[in-house]
Structures are given as structure tokens and as C-alpha cells.
Amino acid sequence: MNRLATGIDILDRQLGGGIPAGSVVLLTADPASQSELFLYELTSTRGTLWLTTLRSEVAVRDALDRCPMPTGNPTVRDVGGDAPLDVANKLVRDLPEGANLVIDVVDMLERAEPPRFRKFLNDLQTHMVNTRGLTVLHGLKGESVPENRDLTEHMADIVFDLDTKIDGSEIENRLAVPKFRGGQALDETIKLRLAERVSVDTSRDIA
């Protein structure tokens, strides 16, 4: 099976070489976390279309420019205005072979009527399979999670769940991969350091 790198070496090794080509991945994380580092790392692997629903195009490009790690030069489009689902669907249809798609954040699209959002996800999956590309849907956790999040989790081929906790003077980040359609989900979480880039936290847990 053809695997696509995520740009995060440790994660690619844990997943047997990367993400299967044609996959749709859901990355869920707290709003006050460094989850965007996953998206920045991904842009370095291949051509990327970045659809932003909350931040402006200028804000996304500025964040990429200021990022201390090597990043790619994604095409950034703001789809957060009127009819975001329709605009996103049109842009997705034009994605070339083997490209990355980042939707940051997917919450805005999840607020559409369930039948329309379901059709969008089905069309997205079909296009990813046909072009052998990779999509990462960035979803926020918290009190205002859209009702369609369950639908996104079910339709996604792979789910990454980033848990960020503050324990005294330490910030602990653990990544779970509870779902891996067509592959093997991880039976343990990965403890990560999310500073300038994504790396493994090698510090020992003290009971």
C-alpha cells in the first residue's frame, strides 16, 4: 500500500510508513494547543491546498512564515464567508494528483445540514481515492463541538486525537490514534513535545 509521509518521522514510523494514499484524516485538539504544528509539518511533504475557515489568508501565511521549522508553500484560500461548504467543494474538485488538503478548521463546514455535509465528505473521499492524495480535517474540541462531528469521525479513515493537559508546571501532550481504517490503530498514546516542532517527549512519567 502506498504510504504518504506526514512530515513527522516518529508518527510515520508508528503508522508503518505514513498514511495510506487516498485517506481522509481527522485531527481533533483543544483550541488552546499547538495542534497547528501538525498542519505546518504536513505542508513540507508535498503540494498543499490550505482552506481556512476562521483565520484570514494573511494570518495563515504569516504564521507559516514565522514558523521556526521548515514548511512548504501551500496555496491558502479563505472559505469562511458565505456558503463555505460550496466554496470548499469547488476548490476540492480542482485538487491535482497526490496533493495535500488541509481544512482548518472543519467546524465551520460541520455546521451545515447533515445531508449536505455527508455528501461533501463522500465527494471528498472519492476525490482523495482517485487522486491518491491526503486530507487532514482540523477539528476543535470543547463545549461548542458541532453536531456533525460524530459524522466526521465515522466517515474519516483515520482519527488523531491530541490531548493537552497542564499538570503543575508541565504541559503534557498525548496523541491517540483510536481509528485506522484499513490499518492498525495504535494501542498506546504517544507522548509528544510540541514546541518549535512535533517531537517525542522522552521524559519519564513519575508516578
Image (spheres, grey):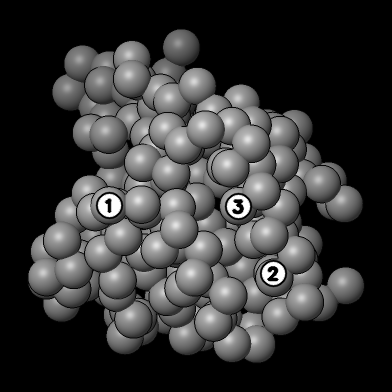
Label placed on residue 128: 2
Residue depicted at 43% across the width and 44% down the height: 109
Q: Is residue 142 left or right of residue 118?
A: left
Q: Earlier in the sequence, mark 2 or mark 3?
A: 3
Q: Secondary structure at mark 1?
A: loop
Q: Earlier in the sequence, mark 2 or mark 1?
A: 1
Q: Secondary structure at mark 2?
A: helix
Which residue is label 1 attached to?
A: 82
Mark 3 packing: few (<14 Cα in 10 Å), some, or many (20+)? Answer: some
At which x and y percent is residue 123? 68, 60
At which x and y percent is residue 197? 32, 61
The three-letter amino acid code for the residue at tag 1 is Asp
Res 117 quadrant in image: top right
Which residue is label 3 attached to?
A: 120
Q: Is residue 98 left or right of residue 31?
A: right
The three-letter amino acid code for the residue at tag 2 is Met
Label placed on residue 24: none
Residue depicted at 33% across the width and 20% down the height: 144
| Cα distance between the residues tagged 2 and 3 | 12 Å
Closer to us: mark 1 or mark 3?
1
Residue depicted at 29% across the width and 74% down the height: 76
Mark 1 packing: few (<14 Cα in 10 Å), some, or many (20+)? Answer: few
